Image (spheres, helix red, strand yellow):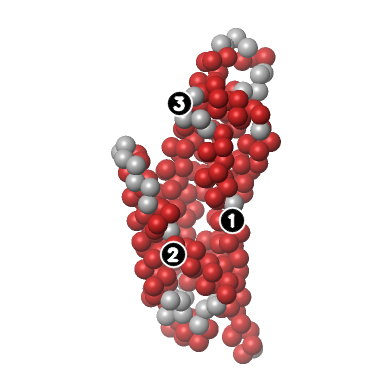
Amino acid sequence: MPIHTERSPLVKARIAGFMYLFMNMFAPFTLLYLPSYFIVRGDARATAANIMASESLYRIGIALNLFNAVGQIFLVLALYQLLKVVSKNAASLMVIFSLASVPISMLNELMQLAVLQLLSGADYLKALPIDQVQAWAYLLVRLHNQGLLIAQIFWGLWLLPMGYLVYKSGFLPKIIGVLLIIACFGYVISSFGRILGYSVDIILYTSWGEVLLLLWLLIKGVDTEQWNQCALESA
């Protein structure tokens, strides 16, 4: 019984850390590399040609984005199990904000699937001029990017209660909690800035809290004594 009590929070930490790593390992590929690979800004014809020349890669990107959206559910539940001993209310808010991004992200991939339908050369599309089809496909590609801005708001908001929980926990470094809160504002400011027509690309500079958290959970875990103390106080 004592063995279980001592190891349980470490197991929770390792699971959450692994889920965080697994969830984020594809993000640079799907959110940064693929758009730059396919999209030629302002050129619908070239963008369509790039997509059709590498259709399999385009489909892989869609599948990975859907995979990440589903994985977000398991990630936040793993973090909830680890952090609920600090405050169930704050942990529940973290779950709500995180899950809000999932349907937005998944529905947003319909834009990408619609692009493939438009460029498929299906018989029912042959009545439309090719340049018009390409223009519609390009519009959907751009709308997909705008949909990411909406999802990104919630990618930021869930970090606010998470940062609070980490800061108050005592079993994780306070500085990581502070950095998570900074990351929250980085996502939200970047999203609303772009929506309002301003280029505020600060996420790469403000999101280090998430990287440090997943590394800490995987390498160090948690202070089991402090975690057990929190668990006793919240029981």
State the image quarter where residue 49 is shown.
top right
Mark 2 closeness class: few <14, some 14–19, many ≥20 residues within 10 Å: many
Labels 3 & 1 near each other (Cβ < 8 A): no
Residue 165, given in percent of the width and then of the height, sits at 41, 70
Relative to 106, does residue 9 appear above or below in the rendering? below
Query: Residue at the location (48% across, 71% down)?
Result: 83
Q: Nearer the viewer, mark 3 or mark 2?
A: 3
Closer to us: 131 or 158 = 131
Provide the residue designation for mark 1.
25
Query: Residue at the location (56% across, 37% down)?
Result: 37
Mark 3 closeness class: few <14, some 14–19, many ≥20 residues within 10 Å: few
Residue 181, given in percent of the width and then of the height, sits at 37, 63
Q: Dot 3 lies on which element?
A: loop
Q: What is the CA distance from the residue labelled 3 to the residue labelled 2? A: 35 Å
State the image quarter where residue 7 is shown.
bottom right
Q: Does residue 90 show up? A: no
Amino acid, disc 3: Gly
Mark 1 closeness class: few <14, some 14–19, many ≥20 residues within 10 Å: few
Name the residue furthest bottom: 2
Relative to 143, does residue 1 appear above or below in the rendering? below
Amino acid, disc 1: Met
Q: Dot 2 lies on which element?
A: helix
Name the residue furthest top: 127
Q: Earlier in the sequence, mark 2 or mark 1?
A: 1
Say left or right for 227 vs 71: left
Provide the residue designation for mark 2.
209
Say left or right for 108 vs 87: right
Query: Residue at the location (43% across, 59% down)?
Result: 207
Provide the residue designation for mark 3.
42
What numbered label is drawn on residue 41? none
